[in-house]
């Protein structure tokens, strides 16, 4: 029986067939893709839905809990991390489903490992928020140090699994156009760069360069407006996992007459610019310069 991959859904839409009326509705189209995602990668799909639940929990608690941690409401960080995890888990499920059948056994191991890693990290973040303290870089007590160390172990596991996923994508060509395939590969690579910036935060035991964490910051994001903040580069690097495959898909959809070599050149050029932006943000942060200076 032929496996319905996620790229085949897009290809059926982009081949010029007349769309059915329900497909014109954004909600119906989203539901269709979520159903296909669940069939292709049920573990990552369910892990994403668990994080949707955590987003809802944080939204419910936020108006009733006025405690502040590092300058923001105690539930803002869990909310951001849960929302980011939904995007990450579903994106990874979408991408890995496009690897050929001979790679899918390894994909299942990756899916389970990433899902467990994200679940452990989120439980740690929510536990520390409930306790009214920070989760990252917190070694103020033996228990806090244990929580931070546990998170570090599973973040490292997640990183190793993404390295494995990158290797699979290079060894087994994913389904899709040249632009999309290289967008996926380069997106995984730059995601690892973003993870390395997270490692840089650990070496500094904080994300603010030039001051302690928790000073004046951008609304919701909290990124420092007076000093360097590594979170901006970390954020941009991690979200290459969405940006680069999307750019590759865009090249195929809106420049269909481009040859494979031209699409490949285009996505490499975009990836170079994207990597340059990540590098610039990292350099500015290390110089103690904020992304946006507000005094």
Image (tube, rainbow, N blue to C red):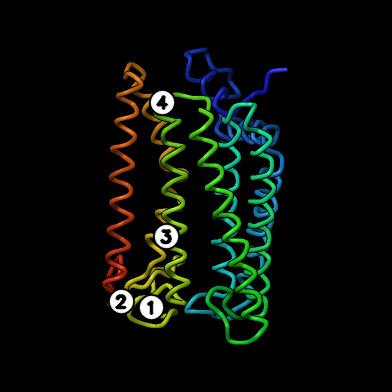
Q: Which residue is mark 2?
A: 226
Q: Nearer the viewer, mark 4 or mark 2?
A: 4
* Disc 1 to disc 3, C-alpha distance: 19 Å
Closest to the camera, between mark 1 and mark 3, is 3
Rounded to the nearest angstrom, the CA distance separating label 2 from label 3 is 18 Å
Q: Which quarter of the picture shows residue 78? A: bottom right
- In front: 94, or 64? 94
Find residue 181 and report its horizontal and vertical position in percent. Answer: 45, 30
Labelled disc at residue 140 = none
Precedes in sequence: disc 2 or disc 3? 2
Judged from the image, the secondary structure of the residue bearing numbered disc 1 is loop
Question: Between marks 4 and 1, how big is the CA–CA gap?
Answer: 44 Å
Relative to residue 263, is residue 154 depicted above or below? below
In contact (CB < 8 Å): disc 1 and disc 2: yes
Q: Nearer the viewer, residue 8 or 110?
A: 110
Report the disc number at residue 234: 3
Quadrant where the C terminus lies?
A: bottom left
Left or right of residue 28: residue 244: left
Q: Assign a secondary structure to mark 2.
A: loop
Q: What residue does disc 1 label?
A: 216
In the drawing, what numbered circle is on residue 178?
A: 4
Q: Quadrant of residue 231?
A: bottom left
The local crowd at label 1, few if under 14, some if 14 to 19, many if 20 or more residues have their Cα within 10 Å, is some
Q: At 64% from the left edge and 75% from the top edge, which residue is drawn?
A: 128
Q: Secondary structure at mark 4?
A: helix
Neighbour tally class for label 4: few under 14, some 14-19, many 20 plus, Cα within 10 Å: many
Badge 4 or badge 1: first in the primary sequence: 4
């Amino acid at each position: 029986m032929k496996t319905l991959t996620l790229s085949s859904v897009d290809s059926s839409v982009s081949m010029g067939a007349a769309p059915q009326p329900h497909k014109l509705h954004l909600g119906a189209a989203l539901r269709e893709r979520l159903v296909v995602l669940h069939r292709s990668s049920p573990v990552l799909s369910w892990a994403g839905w668990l994080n949707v639940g955590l987003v809802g929990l944080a939204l419910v608690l936020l108006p009733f809990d006025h405690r502040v941690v590092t300058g923001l409401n105690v539930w803002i960080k869990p909310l951001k991390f849960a929302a980011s995890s939904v995007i990450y888990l579903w994106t990874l499920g979408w991408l890995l489903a496009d690897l050929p059948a001979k790679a899918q056994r390894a994909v299942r191991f990756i899916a389970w490992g990433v899902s467990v890693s994200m679940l452990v990290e989120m439980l740690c973040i929510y536990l520390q928020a409930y306790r009214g303290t920070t989760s990252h870089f917190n070694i103020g007590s033996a228990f806090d140090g244990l929580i931070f160390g546990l998170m570090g172990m599973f973040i490292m596991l997640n990183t190793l699994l993404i390295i494995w996923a990158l290797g699979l994508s290079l060894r087994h060509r994913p389904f899709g156009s040249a632009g999309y395939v290289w967008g996926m590969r380069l997106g995984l690579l730059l995601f690892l760069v973003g993870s390395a910036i997270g490692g840089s935060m650990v070496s500094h035991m904080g994300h603010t360069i030039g001051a302690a964490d928790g000073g004046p910051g951008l609304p919701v994001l909290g990124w420092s407006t007076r000093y360097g903040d590594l979170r901006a580069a970390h954020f941009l690097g991690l979200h290459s996992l969405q940006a680069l495959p999307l750019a590759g898909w865009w090249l195929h959809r809106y420049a269909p007459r481009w040859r494979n070599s031209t699409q490949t050149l285009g996505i490499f050029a975009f990836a170079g610019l994207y990597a340059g932006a990540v590098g610039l943000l990292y350099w500015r942060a290390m110089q103690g310069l904020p992304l946006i200076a507000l005094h």
